[in-house]
Image: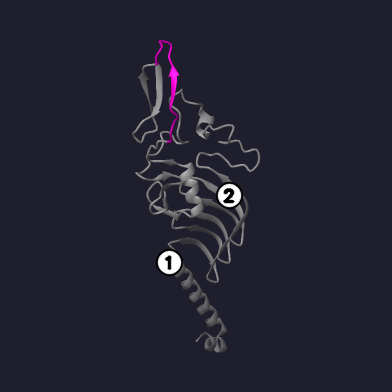
């Protein structure tokens, strides 16, 4: 049909092609759950616009030929953002800023490293008294659902291998590498006995304390007064 129209009316053919292209783009957006608000050129996203992913992450900036191209900012549901320069859908350079305002630096990065384990909140406002240490940068920490892990941008369910945001919305399926990192690194909803050695500690009054693991699945070890 388009070939016939092109033979007799090139202008009408161009309009029809643009309409078909735009309809296809809308169909794909509906299929993926994404949305776009902005300018088009010949049925393709081009110019300034806002592209929102199903995860509610959104890109605000320049587009070209249906791709991120030029200056743009990626906003994430947890409040973080990435300001960068994009080329044909690929970010070439940029700056990541955490939700608390901390900016990531590739060089001289000394936040929460092997020498300084303070959270950014603690660095800004000081440490709490002994016995009131923070578990996360957020204080008080979020309550983790039973059987799940807190992986920083949401909760990970090891049974389904799905990461949801803190509101319960789907974010992604964790691959093997991310799953291993979460299980080895992140906070979980339950306490787990990790073991302690059996030893006797002498006391000043002549008795000894036997340091033994509790039989319950608790992180606490118990102390028992025993005779010599």
Relative to the observer, which residue lies in front, 204 or 67? Answer: 204
Q: Is 72 left, or right, of 55 in this rendering?
A: right
Secondary structure at badge 1 equals helix
Mark 2 burial class by Cα count in 10 Å: few <14, some 14-19, many 20+? some
Looking at the image, which residue sits at the far front? 228
Q: Is residue 56 above or below residue 42?
A: above
From the image, give the main secondary structure of the stretch colored magenta.
Answer: loop
Q: Is 228 left, or right, of 125 in this rendering?
A: left
Label drawn at residue 191: none
Relative to the observer, which residue lies in front, 166 or 194? Answer: 194
Residue depicted at x 53% and y 87%: 5
Residue depicted at x 53% and y 42%: 98
Residue depicted at x 49% and y 49%: 180
Q: Which residue is mark 1?
A: 31
Residue 148 sits in quarter: top left
Residue 29 sits in quarter: bottom left
Q: Is residue 226 above or below residue 23?
A: above
Q: Which residue is mark 2?
A: 83
The Cα atoms of the two marked residues, 2 and 1, are separated by 28 Å
- Tell me, yes or no, if residue 152 can be seen here: no
Q: Is residue 203 magenta?
A: yes
Position of the C terminus by quadrant: top left
Counting from the top left corner in percent of width and height, residue 55 is at 44, 55
The tally of labels here is 2
Counting from the top left corner in percent of width and height, residue 40 is at 53, 66
Magenta residues, as a range?
A: 194-207
Nearest to the eye among marks 2 and 1: give it. 1
Residue depicted at x 57% and y 46%: 96
Counting from the top left corner in percent of width and height, residue 200 is at 43, 21
Secondary structure at badge 2 equals strand
- Mark 2 vs mark 1: which is more N-terminal? 1
């Amino acid at each position: 049909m388009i070939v016939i129209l092109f033979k007799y009316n090139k202008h009408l053919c161009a309009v029809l092609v643009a309409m078909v292209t735009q309809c296809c783009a809308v169909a794909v957006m509906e299929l993926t759950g994404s949305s776009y608000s902005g300018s088009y050129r010949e049925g393709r996203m081009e110019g300034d616009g806002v592209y929102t992913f199903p995860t509610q992450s959104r890109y605000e900036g320049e587009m070209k030929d249906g791709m991120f191209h030029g200056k743009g900012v990626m906003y994430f549901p947890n409040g973080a953002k990435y300001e960068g320069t994009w080329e044909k859908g690929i970010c070439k350079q940029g700056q990541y800023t955490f939700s608390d305002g901390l900016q990531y630096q590739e060089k001289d990065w000394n936040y929460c490293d092997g020498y300084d384990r303070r959270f950014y909140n603690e660095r800004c406002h000081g440490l709490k008294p002994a016995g009131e240490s923070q578990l996360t940068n957020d204080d008080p920490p979020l309550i983790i659902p039973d059987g799940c892990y807190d992986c920083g941008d949401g909760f990970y369910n090891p049974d389904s291998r799905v990461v949801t945001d803190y509101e319960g919305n789907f974010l992604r399926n964790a691959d093997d590498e991310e799953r291993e990192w979460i299980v080895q690194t992140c906070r979980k909803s339950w306490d787990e006995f990790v073991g302690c050695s059996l030893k006797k500690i002498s006391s000043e009054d002549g008795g000894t304390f036997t340091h033994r693991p509790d039989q319950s699945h608790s992180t606490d070890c118990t102390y028992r007064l025993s005779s010599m």
